[in-house]
Image: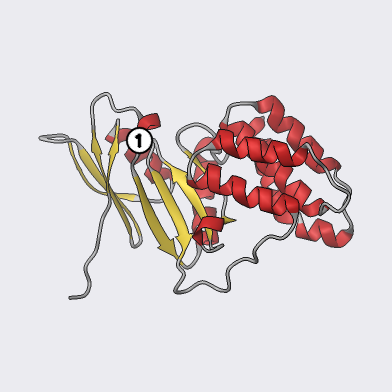
């Protein structure tokens, strides 16, 4: 048989909060009821999600999750980020809800991905569809790039932010003469992002300042441009 469709059914504490948040991301409400069980359905193009309300539910303890496969993770992330800026004045990078940035995932064949953590604590994991993807990102060879790849697995995939911080802090504490300056910038900026997830704005500001102080050639500055774009977003969220 063909044309089957699976729609995730995820828990939340408030269907109203879910409806509002997904409206910010460009979803429309397709169904909503209060009784006999509170639930809501939302849709954005071919992306369908449904949620059910549990009294006293703690989003921080949620195991709710689903995968979204798309040919254009960057476009979807931009659309979500635009909605967040319009509604909240910034992209949410800490607390619940929040959103990570698209990054190559070591534990997903180096295909890019990002995650939306919604008000119900559900992890909506967006990955590039392997069937439509170009060649995956190259496997990192530099010391700092390897540390970054391992930290992304811990924080962005597993939610183990503390472990990711330990990986990055260990790498930053042992600078080596042949470290790639661009990788250093990328590690510092990601460390700043993790500091914000941990509600540590002082460390976030320190890491962003260190990233800005790294000496780069013109070619290196071009390579580091995406990291500095992220840094600017983080700096705006700190204000």
Q: Is 34 in front, or is 127?
A: 127
Q: Pinpoint residue 153: horizontal percent, then vertical percent.
A: 54, 48
Q: Pinpoint residue 155: horizontal percent, then vertical percent.
A: 54, 42
Q: Quadrant of residue 217?
A: bottom right
Q: Is 184 in front, or is 70?
A: 184
Judge the density around disc 1: few (<14), some (14-19), many (≥20) Cα neighbours within 10 Å.
some
Mark 1 lies on a secondary structure that is loop
Q: Quadrant of the C terminus?
A: top right
Q: In this figure, what is the number of numbered marks?
A: 1
Reply above or below: 231 against 183. Answer: above
Q: Pinpoint residue 165: horizontal percent, then vertical percent.
A: 63, 36
Horizontally, residue 23 falls left or right of residue 41, namely right
User: Which color mode does the image show?
Assistant: secondary structure
Horizontally, residue 23 falls left or right of residue 218, namely left
Q: Which residue is mark 1?
A: 62
Q: Pinpoint residue 88: horizontal percent, then vertical percent.
A: 52, 36
Q: Is 179 in front, or is 113?
A: 179
Work out which residue is located at the far left of the displayed protein and give it: 36
Q: Quadrant of the N terminus?
A: bottom left
Is residue 12 visible to the viewer in this orientation of the structure?
yes
Reply above or below: 150 against 98. Answer: below
Is residue 234 visible to the viewer in this orientation of the structure?
no
Picture residue at 57% right of the left edge, 29% below the top:
198
Horizontally, residue 111 falls left or right of residue 224, namely left
Q: Is 102 in front, or is 62?
A: 62
Horizontally, residue 19 falls left or right of residue 139, namely left
Picture residue at 10% right of the left edge, 35% below the top:
36
Picture residue at 70% right of the left edge, 36% below the top:
169
């Amino acid at each position: 048989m063909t044309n089957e469709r699976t729609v995730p059914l995820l828990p939340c504490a408030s269907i109203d909060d879910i409806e509002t948040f997904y409206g910010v991301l460009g979803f429309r409400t397709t169904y909503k009821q209060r009784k006999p069980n509170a639930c809501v359905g939302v849709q954005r193009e071919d992306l369908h999600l449904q949620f059910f309300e549990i009294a006293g539910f703690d989003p921080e303890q949620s195991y709710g999750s689903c995968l979204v496969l798309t040919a254009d993770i960057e476009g979807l992330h931009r659309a979500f980020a635009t909605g967040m800026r319009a509604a909240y004045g910034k992209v949410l990078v800490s607390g619940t809800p929040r959103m990570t940035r698209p990054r190559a995932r070591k534990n997903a064949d180096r295909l890019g991905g990002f995650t939306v953590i919604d008000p119900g604590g559900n992890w909506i994991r967006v990955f590039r569809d392997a069937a439509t993807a170009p060649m995956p990102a190259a496997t990192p060879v530099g010391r700092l790039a390897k540390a970054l790849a391992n930290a992304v697995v811990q924080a962005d995939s597993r939610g183990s932010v503390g472990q990711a911080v330990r990986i990055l802090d260990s790498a930053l504490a042992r600078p080596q003469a042949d470290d790639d300056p661009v990788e250093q910038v990328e590690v510092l900026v990601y460390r700043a992002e993790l500091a914000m997830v941990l509600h540590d704005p002082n460390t976030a500001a320190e890491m962003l300042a260190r990233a800005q102080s790294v000496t780069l050639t013109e070619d290196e500055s071009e390579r580091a441009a995406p990291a500095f774009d992220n840094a600017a977003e983080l700096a705006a969220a700190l204000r």
